[in-house]
Amino acid sequence: MRTSTTLAVGAALLSLTGCTSSSDENPTSRLGTGPPKAAAERASTPSPSPIEEKPKQFGNVLNFSDPVDGGALAVTVLGYEQGVTASITADQEFSTSGYAWAALEIKACVKKGTAGISRFPWVLAFADGARVEPSGVTYGDFPRPEYPYDATVKAGDCVRGKTVFAVPGKQRPERVLYTPEALPEPVEWAVPTA
């Protein structure tokens, strides 16, 4: 009797410890904001829409669905501008030398369900391996319209705007990465040469 009780308790503990993963600790949601779903739910659902291997061109749309939440989204990069002027320079803001503001124009449309939209899954990737995330600051003279920090968007609605980055002034990014948790890997758009 003692052996079977010990085995039953051991099996229960083993099954409990097998249900967690480090990705469950990430507070970023699949589409940009909010808490993630449990690992058990993700394991029992199909993976998101297939992703293309090569970088997309600006204007090419990525359509994907979140298999857990059921939302469907269409996103694209519309443009990139480096050397954006503002009353406060990137160097003044971050106590750096040789950095400049750059603006990325993006658009997201919700096709089905409701989605959290944020600027923070967007990243600039450089040839030397550096990656730059959107600036956490904004000024009244930054390019408009401004892409939202955090918004809930319902089916049939879109958001479009510009997100500003502090980038090395003499380098241009090679790619724009879209990195929401709902996708198994980042999707890329190639940044045109100046």
Image (cartoon, rainbow, N blue to C red):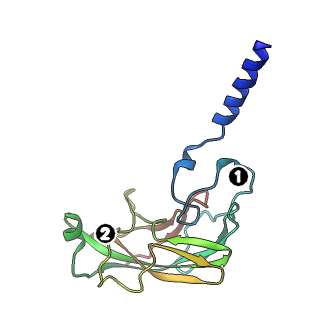
The quarter of the image holding the C terminus is: bottom left
Q: In the displayed structure, would residue 125 be above or below residue 42?
A: below
Which amino acid type is marked by label 1? Glu
Which amino acid type is marked by label 2? Ala
Residue at mark 1: 41
Q: In the displayed structure, would residue 177 be above or below residue 25?
A: below
Give the residue displayed 55% in from the left and 77% down from the top: 76
Label 1: few (<14), some (14–19) or many (≥20) C-alpha neighbours in 10 Å: few
Disc 1 element: helix
In the rendered image, residue 158, in percent from the top left (x then y), is placed at: 57, 83
Q: Which mark is residue 166?
A: 2
Give the alpha-carbon distance from disc 1 to disc 2, as whole Å: 38 Å
The quarter holding residue 47 reads bottom right
In the rendered image, residue 103, in percent from the top left (x then y), is placed at: 37, 77
- As rendered, which of 65 and 99 lies closer to the eye? 65
The quarter holding residue 135 reads bottom left
In the rendered image, residue 160, in percent from the top left (x then y), is placed at: 50, 83
Query: Which of pointers 1 and 2 lies earlier in the amino acid sequence?
Result: 1
Q: List the single residue furthest toward the top.
A: 2
The quarter of the image holding the N terminus is: top right
